[in-house]
Image (tube, rainbow, N blue to C red):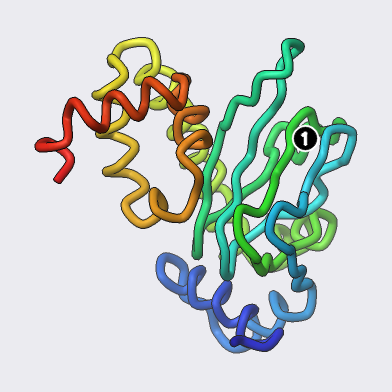
Amino acid sequence: MLNKSGHIKCLIDHIHETHPLNSSEEIEMSKIVRVKELRKKEFLIKPGDYSNYMNFISTGCLRAFYIDKNGQEHTLQLGIENWWVNDLFSYIKNVPSKMYVQAMEDAVIVQIPKNELERLYKEVPVFSNFFREKIQSAYVALQERTIENMSRDAIEKYLAFRKQYRNIEQRIPQYIIASYLGITPEFLSFLRKKHAKDLS
């Protein structure tokens, strides 16, 4: 099991993949982050909270979802190791969250405080470039998912889900996958049985 410095190294290695850091930049990042442990089903964010951190998943699996006025859950985002999870609307607009972000397994999150990150944007350009690209990618992914939900049928959405989230399907309950796809668990089970050959 990793210690605190090991989890921070996971974040730094992740940044290095696209934006190499020198030793002083690594030290600057290490100074400002905090490591947060979550137990299975524990919440990282709840409605009414302010999202004041960028959240990097070092270990574990999380989901972001909201509950509509009828009590129905709608899963918006899933994340595993080396992914990011957040309520970006709350983070960017500085307004209370309307979402839940919950651990599906025991998890360790490396958190970067917003105020410290804003300072680094000005002092260390590599971090500004890295996170600008991350936020742009998140926007593109949201747009693609919106178009996908309007233009694809259920089995096409499920096949796209399996392609995007190759290593996650066995780690979360079927009802959460159904919630992400916008269908019932019963219909998802039907699809999996009907298209078993295509899914093997």
Where is residue 55 drawn, in percent x and y?
67, 57
**Taking the image as drawn, is residue 148 in sight?**
yes
- The residue lying at 49 percent from left, 77 percent from top is 13
Q: How many marks?
A: 1
In this picture, residue 29 sits left or right of residue 142: right
- The quadrant the N terminus occupies is bottom right
**Taking the image as drawn, is residue 133 in sight?**
no
In this picture, residue 142 sits left or right of residue 148: right
Mark 1 residue element: helix
Q: Is residue 76 above or below residue 68?
A: below
In the image, 190 versus 122, the foreground residue is 190
In this picture, residue 76 sits left or right of residue 3: left
Q: Is residue 155 above or below residue 60?
A: above
Where is residue 166 drawn, in percent x and y?
31, 52
Q: Is residue 157 above or below residue 41?
A: above
In the image, 84 versus 101, the foreground residue is 101
- The residue lying at 55 percent from left, 77 percent from top is 10
In the image, 167 versus 7, the foreground residue is 167
Graded by Cα atoms within 10 Å as few (under 14), some (14 to 19) or many (20 or more), the crowding at tag 1 reads some
Residue tagged by mark 1?
A: 90
Q: Is residue 163 above or below residue 17?
A: above
In the image, 130 versus 194, the foreground residue is 194
The part of the image, by quadrant, that contains residue 24 is bottom right
Where is residue 29 drawn, in percent x and y?
69, 75
Where is residue 180 drawn, in percent x and y?
49, 30
- The residue lying at 72 percent from left, 66 percent from top is 123
- The residue lying at 70 percent from left, 39 percent from top is 87
The part of the image, by quadrant, that contains residue 162 is top left
